[in-house]
Amino acid sequence: ENRLYARGPRFRLPAEMIRDHALSASGLLVDHIGGESVKPYQPPGLWGEVVFTNVPRFQQDHGEKLYRRSMYTYWKRSVPPPNMQVFDAPSREVCVLKRPSTNTPLAALVLMNDPTFVEASRKLAERVLREAQSNVTRVELLHRLICGRQPTPEEQRLLLGTLDDLLAGFRAEPAGAAELMTVGESAYDKSLDLTELAAFASLANAVFCTDEAITRN
């Protein structure tokens, strides 16, 4: 009778949920309810390029305000948050009944380069390094936290192979690992091996970029 199965259409998560999912998986999400709007990361100088009002400068918030749910993000209708626009968030200039869902290379660029997602990736790396002991269990935990399920044997093989390549790359270029840890305001755990931390952060970032990570299946 399929009483234990839930059914529904497959669709990409809304822009706000994509950001919140990354923050939640990494442990950064601040789930306090209510309060004033916040101003998380956005490209510097963006408001000054197009805004000619009495508020031409964007004053980024700091601390916990960077990690609040996206519904609290300050929204300037003439300059919406670009990482939200890429994932088809409405401009709020007019009401919309249904959001469009587009698929462009800009989405991958946001997931790979936006400070929110890079920082979430490295904090998720810290989490899996603390909570699991072997690379196999770490990869399984990382995949489960992002995609909501255990990786298949083939996926696990690919993830472990990618991890080996990343470890070799960061061992050959330790400066790159150190630079990765500077993205975002949160400090990294210096008790962890920097090479491993950077490799798992890059792996987490790659998994965040998959279709499954941002899709409700």
Image: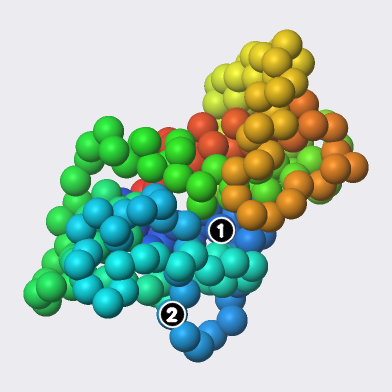
Instruction: Identify whether 180 is placed above or below 47.
Output: above
In this rendering, position of residue 136 left or right of residue 202: right
> Circles 1 and 2: CB distance less than 8 Å?
no
Q: Where is residue 62, by image quadrant?
A: bottom right
Q: Which mark is residue 23?
A: 1
Residue 82: % across, % down: 30, 54
Instruction: Identify whether 9 is placed above or below 157.
Output: below
Tell us which disc is closer to us: 1 or 2. Answer: 2
Q: Which mark is residue 37?
A: 2
Q: Where is residue 129, by image quadrant?
A: top right
Disc 2 residue type (three-letter) = Ser
Q: Residue at x 37, y 36 (%)?
A: 109
Farthest residue, direction right: 191
Q: Tell me which label, 1 or 2, sits earlier in the chain.
A: 1
Instruction: Identify whether 70 is placed above or below 121.
Output: below
Q: Secondary structure at mark 1?
A: helix
Q: Indicate how the structure is coloured in the image.
A: rainbow
Instruction: Identify whether 136 is placed above or below 79.
Output: above
Q: Is residue 201 visible?
A: yes
Q: Residue at x 51, y 32 (%)?
A: 206
Residue in front for this viewpoint, 50 or 36: 50
Alpha carbon separation for disc pair 1 and 2: 17 Å
